Amino acid sequence: MEDKMSFMGNLLRSLFAVAFLSAVTFSANAAENYKPFILATAGNGDFHTQVEKVQAALTQAGFKIVGTYNPDLSTFHPYQAATIFIVTNPTLLADAAKTPRGGYGAVMRVAVTQTNDQVQVAYVNPVYVQYAYRMKADLAPVKAELAKALGDQQSFGAKGLTADALEHYHYTFGMEYFNEPYQLNSFGSHAQAVAKVKSLLTKGVNGLHYLYELNIPGTDQTVIGVAMDDKDNKNVNDAYQMSVVDFHKLKGTAYLPYQILVKGSNVEALNMRFRMAVFFPDLSMMGDHSFMTLMSAPAALHRALAKATGTTYSEPLF
């Protein structure tokens, strides 16, 4: 009888210990903070040589480069030089197909940035993107593949947000969530929508230019990359926007470029008040480097994107 009671006591203690450790582990995971960018490497060296090395490393790791973006830095100068690779792989494409608006997360962005004293290689954090874009997938393997190919010194770009905070993110009261994008235009079919948007962007409508397109297999989604370099309206200019928000030593160049999503016959883009805020969530509301400096940019971008997709938009400037 005593042996039986001793056995039951040990069993209960063991079960309690497992439950306690599981609860602690769950609590730690639930409270984990994620940051938007990952620094792969930083140091002295030739910018163009580093660009070639990154391109080769991505290709060797099985990533497909669907677009390359060299922002026009002739008017505004957030960096001395910058090249962004837009990449995908079979894992990303399969994961994007699991989510109704997963096209936004079908590509990752890798940036090589020349600052005053170093060349930085950094990329968007796939796990951060997973939660921010509400993807029904685990992008940790993609993060591991990028880290293996390029490096992973540290994550940066914010104090950090939990998974739950990212999935329900908006900067402040009255500002948009992920599921409140710019509604740009509608067409008779998906193919017609893609063709029209590509045609207008190729012509360079309102300082917006076509960079790449990617069809998400098995879905009605096509994501299109957009460069912004309007010389007459700095609010629709990538370099100007980054000169305002990307002022810390470690650069979030991999925020670029913007995206348009064609879903079915409808065309949309993430609202700038969400997209910029979620990648730069620690920016202050007021001051020289703040969202207030770009107060008129979200409406200006909405107007430009609407025209670039064949329609008009009449929201007030602010």
Image (cartoon, grey):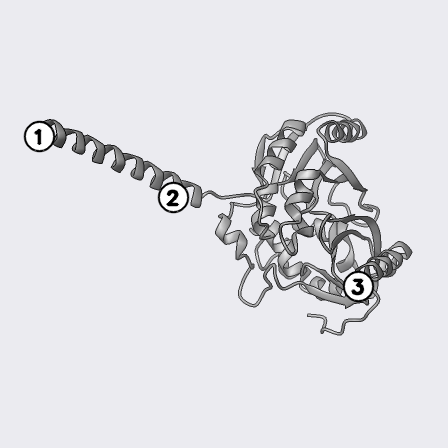
Spot occupied by residue 265 in the image (x, y as percentages of width and height): 77, 63
Going by the picture, which residue comes out furthest to the left?
Answer: 1
Cα separation, mark 1 vs mark 2, equals 39 Å
In the rendered image of this protein, does residue 236 appear above or below residue 79? Answer: below
Q: Nearer the viewer, mark 3 or mark 1?
A: 1
Q: Quadrant of the C terminus?
A: bottom right
Across and down, in percent, residue 49 comes to 79, 26
**Location of residue 87 in the rendering, given as x and y in whole percent from the top left corner:** 73, 39
In this picture, residue 216 sits left or right of residue 141: right
Q: Nearer the viewer, residue 196 or 32?
A: 196
Between disc 3 and disc 1, whose residue precedes?
Answer: 1
- For label 1, the residue is 1
User: What residue sits right under mark 3 in the picture?
Assistant: 304
Residue 227 visible in the picture: yes
| Label 1 secondary element | loop
The total of numbered circles placed on residues is: 3
Identify residue type, mark 1: Met
Q: Which mark is residue 278?
A: none
Q: CA distance from mark 2 to mark 3?
A: 45 Å
Q: CA distance from mark 3 to mark 1?
A: 81 Å
Asked whether, in this view, residue 216 is left or right of residue 140, the answer is right
Q: Earlier in the sequence, mark 2 or mark 3?
A: 2
Q: Residue at x 80, y 61 (%)?
A: 233
Q: Are marks 3 and 1 in contact (CB under 8 Å)?
A: no
Secondary element at image label 2: helix
**Which residue corresponds to mark 2?**
27
